Amino acid sequence: KNQVEQSPQSLIILEGKNCTLQCNYTVSPFSNLRWYKQDTGRGPVSLTIMTFSENTKSNGRYTATLDADTKQSSLHITASQLSDSASYICVVSDSWGKLQFGAGTQVVVTP
Amino acid sequence: DAEITQSPRHKITETGRQVTLACHQTWNHNNMFWYRQDLGHGLRLIHYSYGVQDTNKGEVSDGYSVSRSNTEDLPLTLESAASSQTSVYFCASSDARGTEAFFGQGTRLTVV
């Protein structure tokens, strides 16, 4: 069973609108959670990383939250742009540095 | 600058051939991973290593093998390539607690 679940699987949003992606995990012992953006045909690129004690982290128009008690995270994209069209992957690391991946949310931003 | 590189970027091979994909990192990371990514699926773990001489099976390890003779390299070998192994392969490395993690650009493998 996958220890990192993401929702929705895909979404389409209009340029300029906001959206929120969800990630639930069961990885233990937990070390950190990061959100990656993966453009088609490219390797994933890290957007944010949060440890147990951090509950929010921003990177430009991307804001991630973490609730370590409920083991949930979200990624909020503000004022979406066409270049935000990509797959967004939630990755949780255990204490030994093993990376567990969610299946990703495919975001399509339309004009 | 430190980096992680994969080679080749593209490979076409025939069914039954042995194929080796290279992954080289200069981050001095202990942990290295191989994933495959197929349409409709997220990244799935094939094999991983926590250090020299250490290798472990991931969730989709059948038909693949790895070896870790030094810190920098984790080659992935397909012993007898099958069409089901047509995929995009990503290598990653991370430090001991996963606070640093980087991916290669991927290798697109086609088995015909």
Image (cartoon, rainbow, N blue to C red):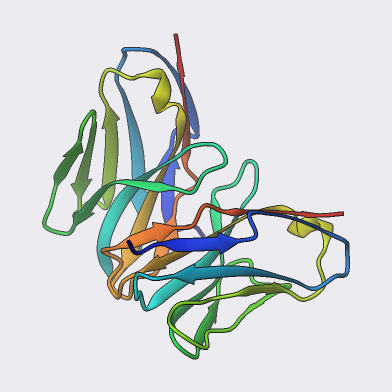
Residue A77 lies in quadrant: top left
Please tell me which residue lies in front, B10 or B101. Answer: B10
Question: In the image, what residue occupies the spot 18% across and 38% down?
Answer: A58
Residue A56's spot in the image, x, y percent? 15, 43
Would residue A37 be seen by someone viewing this image from the given angle? yes
- On the rendered structure, is B41 left or right of B97? right
Residue B93's spot in the image, x, y percent? 41, 67
Residue A110's spot in the image, x, y percent? 46, 13
Seen in the picture, residue A9 relative to B8 is either above or below; the reply is: above
Residue B100 lies in quadrant: bottom left
- On the rendered structure, is A58 left or right of A100? left
Seen in the picture, residue A60 relative to B68 is either above or below; the reply is: above
Please tell me which residue lies in front, B80 or A65. Answer: B80
Residue located farthest toward the bottom when viewing the structure as drawn: B53
Question: In the image, what residue occupies the spot 39% across and 69% down?
Answer: A98
The number of callouts visible is 0
Would residue A26 be seen by someone viewing this image from the given angle? no
Question: In the image, what residue occupies the spot 23% across and 40% down?
Answer: A64
- On the rendered structure, is A83 left or right of A69? right
Seen in the picture, residue B63 relative to A61 is either above or below; the reply is: below
Please tell me which residue lies in front, B44 or B99. Answer: B99
Residue A96's spot in the image, x, y percent? 32, 76
Residue located farthest toward the top when viewing the structure as drawn: A111
Q: Quadrant of the N terminus of chain B?
A: bottom left
Q: Quadrant of the C terminus of chain B?
A: bottom right
